[in-house]
Image (spheres, rainbow, N blue to C red):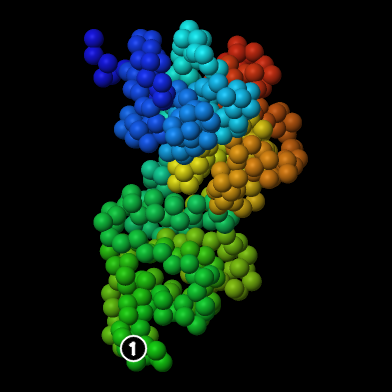
Amino acid sequence: MTTENLPVLLVVEDDEGLQRQLKWAYDGYRVVTAGDRRSAIELLRLHEPAVVTLDLGLPPDPDGTAEGFACLTEMLSLQPDTKVIVASGHGARESALKAVALGAYDFYRKPVDIDDLGLIVSRAFHLHGIEAENRRLAEGAGDGTTVLGSMISASPEMLKVARTVERVAPADVSVMLLGASGTGKELLARAVHERSPRSRGAFVAINCAAIPENLLEAELFGYERGAFTGAVKTTPGKIELAQGGTLFLDEVGDIPLPLQVKLLRFLQERMIERIGGRVPIAVDTRIVCATHQDLDAMCADGRFREDLFYRLAEIVVRIPSLAERAGDAVLLARHFVQRFARELARPVSGLAPDALAVIDAHGWPGNVRELENRIKRAVIMADGKQVGAADLDLGGRQDEEPAAINLRAAREAADRRAIHQALVRTEHNISGAAKLLGISRPTLYDLLKQYRLSA
């Protein structure tokens, strides 16, 4: 019977007799063996085993544990999801505590009991399989958590935004994205562009708040050589560079009034003139803009032209804050943990239950950007294989819910939110969600049916 399709078990052991004994003791696995750290790392890279048994007493120091611990650390750095089971006859208790603190899955004492070790190995393979499936589900493979190609969400509020974007993208109309900082406005603008007939053209973005007022006109409209001091060559502006594509005006509310007049003229005539130029240039580009400001109030105060607002806001898409997206904070946190663990080569594989609780409770005033930064810091600071609440340093803060007017509606909304959060936190495990909610599985099924929610 071929072993090519069997799960790989890597045995790292310098005793050749024990190597052979372990190699033939396991049915159902393809066993590969290594006698030192260098060959162990080579085999780890080659086979990417789910489970490793590691003798801490490796050459050149077989009577100590330094080389074994170095091997453990390097393995988990390269492949954080691997279940490493360590063994040593040297100071077993101290070695066990240190190995687990470094991220080892389990520990066994020498001399080896093959039956006991076999049970530990079997359990490690089983857990690795469950975690791999959970990661696949959390990353949105077939469960609807990835929307518009790159945004991660399972909240009804954000799914409604995604449907709106998909509907308006093919229509050649100006789109206004309204939402707080950090809610993903540029990602949505790119999604509009990528789903439009202009997707083969350029997507050109400019942050109107990040450019000084005296330079913004040149950035948008370009300039001719000699138009002003320092204009040593003719330079097209962002509008012109977006010919045939999409121009994204981020923080459009920060455009000064004199420049608003020139932008309005372009939108009406689809012609521009560079600074210092005399020749009109026809430009065919779609405008998508975004702001966190209240443009209605700015129009009423005379700080933003009403006629420009209506030109820019043919379609308005309001983006909910992260606090309004039930369950999304946990989904995004899991995604960021996996991403940063991989990018930063950290042996972190998930979020501890106390971390999930504080993530769910926090108000996230900085939205997705704040969550991303907080998770990145936590992955760096975490000592074990899981990010804990202390690593997030959120202090257990919670935002108060707004007072409800209709009690029945408030109860239903609270039920829906709690069920959705429980399902997200348990990765849609019905038994786990029911336990988290403090109800029975049949009761949860009844509530899912009553509120027409999917498991």
Q: Residue at x 29, y 54 (%)?
A: 199
Instruction: Tell me, yes or no, if residue 261 can be seen here.
Output: no
Q: Residue furthest left?
A: 2
- The residue that appears at 57% across and 59% down in the rendered structure is 292
Q: Nearer the viewer, residue 88 or 222?
A: 88
135 shown above or below 107: below
The total of numbered circles placed on residues is 1
In terms of depth relative to the viewer, which is nearer, 243 or 316?
243
Q: Residue at x 38, y 15 (%)?
A: 17
Query: Which residue lies under the disc numbered 1?
Result: 232
**Can you see residue 202?**
yes
**Measured along the vertical axis of the image, is residue 334 above or below residue 436?**
below
> Label 1 sits on what residue type?
Val
Left or right for 414, reference 228: right
Q: Quadrant of residue 326?
A: top right
The N terminus: image quadrant: top left
Crowding around mark 1 (Cα neighbors within 10 Å: few <14, some 14 to 19, many 20+) is few
* Residue 185, position as x, y percentages in the image: 49, 54
The percent position of residue 48, horizontal first and vertical second, equals 36, 30
Q: Which residue occupies the extreme top position in the image?
A: 115
Q: Is residue 384 above or below residue 15?
A: below
Residue 234 pos. (x, y %): 30, 84
In this rendered view, identify the residue nearer to me: 134 or 255. 134
**Residue shown at the point (53%, 31%) measured from the top left:** 65
Q: Secondary structure at mark 1?
A: loop
